[in-house]
Amino acid sequence: MFLVRRLEKYDCRIHFDRRRRVRCKPRRVVRELTGETRTSQELFMSPSFSGLPSGHQTMLLAHRAMVTDLPRIAAAASRLAETPNAERAVALSGYIDRVHALITHHHEGEDEFLWPRLSGLGADEGAIALLTAEHQELEKFLFDWSRAARELAADGSVAAELARVTMDVHARIAAHAEDEETELAGRLAPVLDNAVWKGFETHMRKTAPLWTLRFMPAWLLSVAAPGELGGVPALPIARLFRGWLARTQHAALGG
């Protein structure tokens, strides 16, 4: 399967130290199609970022936020396994519930709107089939991750398992994001235009749960560089709630 084949390419080498704490060592990612070697930062943010449609910019920032947050979540769960803290366990469980919902909504938006729209415009069916299959394969792992997070709120003994599952999800999300960006810039590019991206942005906004208005923009802003703010939706709201998000993350993830 695509996820197994790409294990050696993840930008984060996953292991546990002697005390069974999750450790993530960055390494470089090799692009199969071009032979280039890129870091995860370079992978999700190309030099031409500001020239992309805003919907594409937002997708890149969403991928970065996912890949950035998952190791932090795993490390927090690992610390809970060593030093139980009921209050932090509840906060972490709630935080994962939000991130899981954002990832699920992201994939649903692609499956329900973006891929069908591109298919109708004559997009490469092989690329669409690949990305659809990857979503289906990810569903089980995301479900297991969500289940472990819910259990954590009532049973701190699952913290070590949650840390392991989270890093598994991280590796798979990173591999999928790489595939998705490769296809959007490659086989799907001929039918992608501003109208498609505008339609996708509208669909995502209309279908997003109300609570995401406070969380999602600030979440993307937290990983955006100064020159990447065009990809942050509702930027004034993002700035308004970034302090709230930082406090929420501190309660769930620690320092």
Image: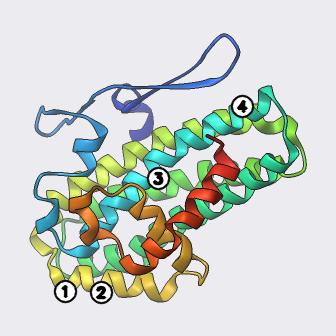
Do residues under tags 1 and 2 come within 8 Å of each other at their CB atoms?
A: yes
- Give the CA separation, mark 1 to mark 4: 46 Å
Name above or below for residue 201 compared with residue 174: below
- Give the CA separation, mark 4 to mark 2: 42 Å
Which residue position is annotated with label 4? 79
Left or right placement of residue 24 versus residue 99 in this view: left
Q: Nearer the viewer, mark 4 or mark 3?
A: 4
Which kind of residue does numbered mark 2 sit on?
A: Gly
Which residue position is annotated with label 3? 66
Residue 122, image quadrant: bottom left
**Which residue is at the front of the view, 47 or 118?**
47
- Give the CA separation, mark 1 to mark 3: 26 Å
Q: Nearer the viewer, mark 3 or mark 2?
A: 3
Left or right placement of residue 57 versus residue 113 in this view: left
Which residue is pictured at 33% across the width and 55% down the height? 130
Where disc 2 sits, the SS reads helix
Give the mark nearest the N terminus, 3 or 2.
3
Where, quadrant-wise, is the N terminus in this rendering? top left
- Give the CA separation, mark 1 to mark 2: 6 Å
Where, quadrant-wise, is the C terminus in this rendering? top right
Which residue is pictured at 52% across the width and 52% down the height? 138
Label at residue 199: 2
Label at residue 195: 1
Give the mark nearest the N terminus, 4 or 3.
3
Q: Nearer the viewer, mark 4 or mark 2?
A: 4
Left or right placement of residue 251 versus residue 227 in this view: right
Residue 39 visible: yes
Which residue is pictured at 57% across the width and 63% down the height? 245
Residue 120 visible: no
